[in-house]
Each structure stands twice: as structure tokens, then as C-alpha cells.
Amino acid sequence: MQKPNDQTIKADAGKAKLSLVPPAIIYDIAKVREYGNKKYPEGGKDNWKRVEPQRYIDAAYRHLLAFTENPKSIDEESGLEHLWHLACNIAFLCELENEQSIDDTIIKCKNCQFSEPSIMKGQLLCNRDGARKVYTDPNGFCHRAAKERNTND
């Protein structure tokens, strides 16, 4: 007979036991995400990664205050509970923090001044002329702006 935590048949020691997470929060966040994807269809399902973390902090605080005033309060725009929006904003912040330090997230291209959270620490995505390019120039210009500067020199 096998022992219940026998790692020779299933090596899962140290892995997150996701069954401990209340499923309701996952459904609640999914409802907010579905609403957000309908409201902001451009950029695909990961469009939330292009938002500055401070905006999620501010939104989380607004939803927290609304929830504190009335635990069953509903967001007028979405028709969803403020608590669900709060959970979603916190989830975004956790994920962004997991990817990199929030303080290092926002970088602005010197050419177009567009900024958004970088996908990887030390990178910048530039939206000049609607073309998202990865920052590679050590002088603080996005890829496209750096190429244009070198061509004009």
C-alpha cells in the first residue's frame, strides 16, 4: 500500500495546492475580466499588462472604499460588485509584481514619451505610430526611434 504523500508516484512536494483557493474568487475575477475584454477589445486578452501599475492601485483603492461603505455595492458602469473589481485589480498587481518590481515597471521613450509596463525588466514597449516595438537602445529611445535617430545622423 502506498503512503498518501509518496513522492515516488507523484512529485508534487512544494507545489501550490490550488484547491485551497476559494473558487468563487476565480469566477469573480473572470467576470470582471470578461467585462474588461468587451470594454477594451483592442490588445487582446492581455491588454491589462499595458496599464501602469499605479492606475490599478488607484482603481483598487476606489473599489475598496466603495466596498467598505457597502459590502454589496455594485459598480454602476459594469453592474458587477466592487469587491470583484477589487480582487481583479489586486490580481493584476500581484501578477505585475511577480514579473518585476512595480518601481521598475514604467519607462518612457525619450522620442515619443509613450510608456507602458515592460514585459520583461529593463524593456520598454513603444507605441509610436501605433507600432509596438521593444526598447533596445541604451540611450533611452525605443527600438524604432533609435533606428530613426541613427539613420538621420
Image (tube, rainbow, N blue to C red):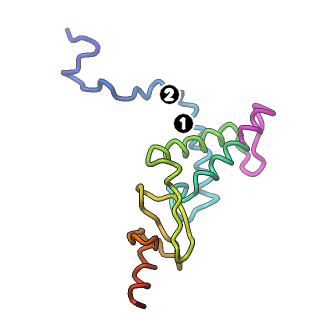
Disc 2 residue type?
A: Val
Residue 64 bears which disc, if any?
A: none
Mark 2 lies on a secondary structure that is: loop
The residue sitting at 51% across, 71% down in the picture is 109
In magenta segment, residue 104: no
State whether residue 132 is above or below residue 152: above
* Placement of the C terminus among the 4 image quadrants: bottom left
State whether residue 123 is above or below residue 137: above
Q: Mark 2 points at which residue?
A: 21
Residues at discs 1 and 2 in contact (Cβ within 8 Å): yes
Specify start and end residues of the magenta stretch as a single range. Answer: 63-79
Q: Name the residue under label 1.
A: 26
Query: Left or right of 70: which side holds 123?
Result: left
Q: Upstream in the sequence, badge 1 or badge 2?
A: 2
| Residue 144, x across and y down, in percent | 43, 78
Q: Which residue lies furthest to the right in this view?
A: 69
CA distance for labels 1 and 2: 8 Å
Neighbor class of circle 1 (other Cα within 10 Å; few <14, some 14-19, many 20+) is few
Work out whether residue 45 can be spotted: no
Query: Left or right of 85: which side holds 147?
Result: left
| Residue 127, x across and y down, in percent | 52, 72
Disc 1 residue type?
A: Ile
The residue sitting at 61% across, 44% down in the picture is 89
Work out whether residue 9 can be spotted: yes
